[in-house]
Amino acid sequence: MIRYLILLFLISTTQVFSQILEPVKWSTRTEKISDTEYSLISRAVIDPGWHLYSQTVPEDGPIPTSFVFDDSDGSFELLGGTSEGEGHTVNDPVFGMRIKYFGDSAEFVQRIKVLGDVGTVGAVVEFMVCDDSRCLPPTEVDLRFALGNGPDTFMGESAEELRPKTNDTAVIADKSPAPGTLRGLWSIFFIAFISGFAALLTPCVFPMIPLTVSFFTKQSKSRASGIRNAVLYGMSIVAIYVLLGTAVTAIFGADSLNALATNVWFNLIFFLLLVVFAVSFLGAFEIALPGSWANKVDEQSYKKGGIIGIFFMALALAIVSFSCTGPIVGTLLVEAASKGGLAPIIGMLGFSLAIALPFALFAAFPGWMNTLPRSGGWLNTVKVVLGFLELALAFKFLSQADLVLQLHWLEREVFLAIWIAIFLGLALYLFGKVRLPHDPPLAHISVGRLGLGLLTLTFVVYMLPGMWGAPLNLISAWLPPQEYSESPYGVGFAKTGGTVSGAGHEDLPEGAHLLPPHDIIAFNDYDKGLAYAKQVGKPVLLDFTGWACVNCRKMEQNVWPKPRVLGILKNDVVLVSLYVDDKRPLPEDEITDSKLRPGKKLRYIGQKWSELQALRYRANSQPFYVMMGHDEENLVEPVAYTPDMDQYHGWLKKGIENFRK
């Protein structure tokens, strides 16, 4: 337990120097089919957390993987196209389309027929990779396939050959781990911790607190030994649930959980499972493990004694309380599976800590037991509330399956209508207008129950405008995307922000354009943007971005529209957006030799900006933001993907303040 907490602390407080990333390693081999036919096999090994896009990406999506084989001398011919593995096909809410990608590894096979004397075949693969918080620009790697006596395997160009040799000062950026990944782990831990307290307040667990604490204090020879045993009991609870999370990660694989979570059948099965959990919480039936399990474990706790006996007592608690904790634990593991990596372990750590803490604390301070409320009908109310929440969460998984299949059965309005009905039902239950099978007679409504009912009703009222297109930012991560809707531009969906000071829309500077939907004046050319910034006396905000960069769009859709950030982008800086995947050719007089890859030419606009980012800032992931003055020196350390609006706004303000000094 302590080890995992230390790990999280170190991850959250450690920053490393930014670097050129190379998450994909290429190798090749050949297989002889006949005297004249060969299979050329290209294998990509992909770092954990990254994914490589397929060759068949829809138009207006991310950059697909593509192969170009050098058959210019006519010594061989291609037989059909390049085949690829099954991969994972998911619905991407940012691009609004189904996209296929590969994780861990991928193989591509091209068959050829040899027509003459040929020993090796050359090829170039162009590809794009992304993880949860950044994308890299399109990359080209030279491949070589040996048909004769050459080496059986050829490795693609090494990252060291591609690293820029420069004396420029490296900037500090959050690169390892990705910020989005870290936030995901902390959010899982926090949600699991709150869920653990919710489970603590259920009829299966809450009455066990005074019984268990009394047992330890009475059976122990001294107060100190009683406290020690209770602490060991709490640590055993933590160990049991963390082992469960570890088992889930080990069985499914840390890197495959995220891919599994986007599978249609996975989402459908867990939709049904969560509905069953919800119905159980609402009182239709009880979910329990066989009673013989609890009896055998309880028997072992008395036989073994000592630390082992305490562990078996904790295991008995986990089994006996399964009817209440099982649905919560199952839901947490399902949600953690969608995050992948250590999320199931972190989730079980947070959940078990919340359950274990009261046993240790009340054993240390027995006087606190008098402050505990008595068991009663309120415990059943907690259970029913959890049932409504489980039911609402179930439709998140059904929505995910609908998005992947693009059936349009559960569009945004339908999803919201279901949630409005569920939470309205919860509000009516809390107000005493609806009774369920195990509810005792309700003589009056407590202040706490009334307050929770009013809060739930407020949430229902908040969701209502979403039926006509309001963005609903508080729950946007749970809803189908805005465009997956019957009325994506209905009531409540409008452009944000005010007017631009100092420039009219009809009189834009040379080389500038308005960036929709917020009407920010932006440049796509470095030199023109810098010249305009000098003319108007403002700092430059370099935005290294990409047309196919998912997290660039998230920043533009979720962070930039916030009033404080939008005001700065419109009035206090000159935005220069440099698209590293821009495939438009450079003018002939701008085509130059690459400094990163000797012998190669920079022929496209995106290559020019990608090389600028790598040479000057030693970084190649997007989004990447640089605030600089007219002398082209950094005003503040560059940042990458920063979904926290306050953090991003503070970074912008610091850069502007340094510019004005």
Image (cartoon, helix red, strand yellow):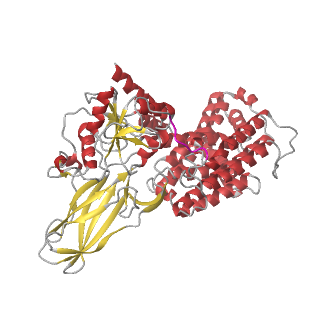
Please state the horizontal and vertical placement of residue 192, each as a whole percent of the image: 58, 43
Quadrant, the C terminus: top left
The magenta-colored residue range is: 491-497
Q: Position of 18 compared to 429: left or right?
A: left
Q: Position of 572 compared to 597: left or right?
A: right
Please state the horizontal and vertical placement of residue 133, each as a whole percent of the image: 42, 45
Towards the viewer: 180 or 305 = 180
Towards the viewer: 297 or 581 = 581
Which of the 4 image quarters holds residue 156?
bottom left
Q: Which residue lies furthest to the front in this view?
A: 506
Residue depicted at x 85% and y 45%? 440
Residue depicted at x 74% and y 29%? 371
Residue depicted at x 58% and y 61%? 408
Q: Can residue 291 be seen in this view?
A: yes
Q: Position of 271 compared to 71: left or right?
A: right
Whether residue 135 appears in magenta in the rendering, the answer is no
Please state the horizontal and vertical placement of residue 106, each as a whole percent of the image: 35, 62
Towards the viewer: 530 or 297 = 530
